[in-house]
Image: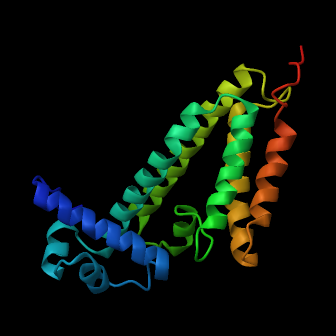
Amino acid sequence: MKVVPTTDRGRATVGRVLEAACDLFNAQGIRSTSLDEIGAAAGVGRGQLYHFFVDKSDLVAEVVTFQVERVIAGLQPTMEAMSTSDDVRAWCEAVVNSYAATPGPIRCPLGSLINQLGDDDQAARSALQAGFARWERLLEAGLQRVADTGGLSAGVAAGDLAAALLAAYQGGVLLAAVHGDVAPLRRALRGVAEVALVDSAAPVSQ
C-alpha cells in the first residue's frame, strides 16, 4: 500500500475499496476486474485509488491480506475451541454445510485466488502462502489438543493431520466445484478424519 490511512475517513475509504474488490474478484475474477469497476463499486474515484495503492498489483496484494484476515478471524474461535475428536468431526461437517447453504459457485475464499495471480503478483502470492500457513498452524494447535486428550490414532502427528485435512479441504472444494455438489468435499474430509481419529468414547491405547 502506497499510503496507509491515518484518519477514520481514510480507513473507511480503504475498507470500502477492499470489500468491493473482494466481492468483484470473487464474482468475476481478478484479471476480469478493472480498477474503474472497483472504484465504482466502492464509491471512490480513480484518484483516490491511486492515492492509497500504487497499481492494481498493489491492490491485489492488499485484498489477499484482507481476505486472509477475514478467513482467519472466522476460523479462530472454532480452532481454539477444538479439543476432542468430536470437535474435529463437527468442524468437518460445518465446513460442508456452509458450502451447501451458500448460493453460487463453490470455491474456497483463499484457494480460489492462487490460479488468478500473475507473475507480477508476488506480494499477493506471499500473503496467500502466509495465510495458508496460519490456517495450518491454527488447525495443528487444535489437533494437538485432541491428541493430548487421546483423540488421535496411535502414530498420527497433529502437524501431519493438519496438512492432510487442509489438502483434503482444498481438493474437496475443487471437486465439489467441478461437480456442483458438496459430496466430494464431505468424502474427502471424512476420509482423512476417520482414519486419524479415535472415537471420544473409546479407551486410549497404551
Q: What x and y, as percent, mark residue 138? A: 56, 38
Q: Is residue 167 above or below residue 48?
A: above
Tell me if residue 178 can be seen. Answer: yes
In the image as oriented, which residue stretches furthest toward the front?
Answer: 101
Across and down, in percent, residue 175 comes to 74, 70
Judge whether 148 appears above or below 134 on screen. Answer: above
In the orientation shown, which residue stands out farthest toward the top? 206
Colouring method of the image: rainbow
Q: Position of residue 199 (x, y in %)?
A: 84, 31
Q: Nearer the viewer, residue 41 or 119?
A: 41
Image quadrant in which the N terminus is located: bottom left
Left or right: 192 with respect to 54?
right
Image check: 7 left or right of 55?
left
Residue 120 appears in the rendering: no
Which is more toward the observer, 124 or 34? 34
Image quadrant in which you'd find residue 100: bottom right
* Image quarter (top left, top right, bottom left or bottom right) of the C terminus: top right
Q: Position of residue 4 (x, y in %)?
A: 17, 56
Residue 39's place in the image compared with 145, above or below, is: below
Could you tell whether 201 is left or right of 106 in the image?
right
The total of numbered circles placed on residues is 0
Residue nearest the viewer, comparing 40 with 50: 40
Residue at the image point whose x is 66% and y is 45% from the top: 91
Q: Residue 96 sits in which quadrant?
A: bottom right
